Amino acid sequence: MNPTKTRSQFDSRKIVIFGAGKIGRSFIGQLFGVGGYKLVFIDIDPVIVERLNSRGEYQVIIKGETDEEISIRNVEAILASDKKMAADAVSSAGILAVSVGKNAVEKVIPVIAAGLEQRYSENPEKPLDIIIAENMADAAGYMKRELERNMSHDYPFEKLVGLIETSIGKMVPLMTQTDLEKDPLLLFAEPYNTLILDGKGFKSSIPGIKGLAPKVNIKAWVDRKAYIHNLGHTTSAYFGYFKHPLAKFIYEVLDDREVYDFTREVMVQSAESLVVAYTDDFTSSDLEEHIDDLLKRFRNIALKDTIYRVGHDLVRKLGHDDRFAGVIHLADHCGTASDKILKAMSYGLCFRATDENNRQFPPDAAFLQFLEKEPETALIKELHLDPAGDKFIIEQLIKFSRSSTGKR
């Protein structure tokens, strides 16, 4: 094999996807695979990489009223530790996607940077668009800063790199150990398959792929995802667990009218702030229609989405810039109400759901223990709430935590 020749074989119909996990394969991979693209996954899991290479395909089961199996073909995979091969893949890609989880993005930056430099030396006129399939604030700004830190100062970044922020709304439940033992490549997913992305971020033309939904003001849509979808989903888990601690699935607790109504009220209250903040993007009726559609999706029995999956990782989900505190801050700015949102956030302090092995998420257990001993310190140090600016939030969370102790 001639490595130089291989690297220079640019393929406009090839997408390289960092992360062969749930979103990488069942969402990005499915959209582009069905759209006729060759898929090249880069992942840290040697079992997943080996099986993708040996089979050249994988299956996604769409969980709706009836199950639908989709086979995604023309698939290859590269082990993330093979940095040279990964950089070669970046260099020759038609488009790139990153779906590794926001805490791991920094680990793939050096390889992407190396691939971009290599691409520039071999195909200096070919830009590369990078779909950032992560739910993270200012994803494009973060990627730009980190990539530039790893690249030469004379690289024409603005000309050759498109950074495409997204709003990931697809729900993909955790697979049970039994399912994974049957087939580590198998994935379950809901029917929803629309990828909202930043239409202004592309340097090349937007791919003609069914399911892509480019938007002009991506920040509005990222906030809609965080402050309605994520907020509502987690509210149903926290209040649902508070009322039904033995329940396992989200659809079970949403069958309780009180849980359903409270969840909807929280989402509608958040929508009021979004309408004020983004008057050119949303109307109240638009968002209420979206809320009712989401609640229907949350109640998808076939998806078997668990309360544990939706609610765990308290430190992140209750954090100062995430779904609850983030929209409370927005409401303060917009002059809208947030009392129901704060109440929903409070229920997270009672959340002790366990996984299929009856184990609590270890960081959650540690946080809740800290909270019981030093409530104010835990909220400030772990959730990064501001002692002055978030004083009211802190006071209300502590008050709720103390009053609810006897109910658990």
Image (cartoon, grey):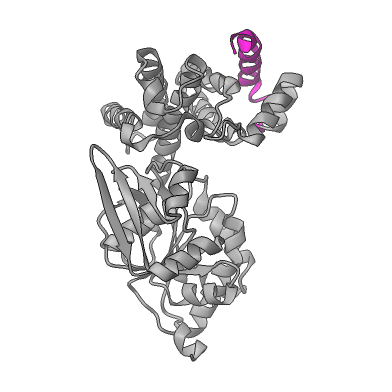
The magenta stretch spans residue 356: no
Image height of 223 relative to 402, above or below: below
Q: Is residue 396 magenta?
A: yes
Q: Quadrant of residue 366?
A: top right
Q: Is residue 194 visible?
A: no
Percent of width and height locating residue 16: 43, 67
Please say if 161 is above or below 323: below
- The residue located at (40%, 17%) in the rendering is 259
Question: How many labels sit on residues?
Answer: 0
Residue 303 left/right relative to 376: left
Q: Residue at x 65, y 31 (%)?
A: 383
**Is 130 above or below relative to 177?**
below
Percent coordinates x, y for residue 316 in the rendering = 59, 36
How far from the left and from the top, in percent, is residue 336? 45, 21
Q: Which residues are magenta?
A: 383-408
Please give the name of the residue rendered at 23% of the width and 37% of the height, measured from the top-left corner: 65
Q: Residue furthest bottom?
A: 2
The rendered magenta stretch, by its main secondary structure, is classed as helix
Image quarter (top left, top right, bottom left or bottom right) of the C terminus: top right
On the rendered structure, is 291 left or right of 248? left
> Residue 74 appears at what percent x and percent y?
33, 69
**344 vs 54, nearest the viewer:** 54
Tell me which corner region of the image, top left, top right, bottom left or bottom right, holds residue 164.
bottom left
Left or right? Give the position of 108 relative to 379: left
Residue at point 60% right, 50% down? 103
The one nearer the camera, 259 or 283, is 259
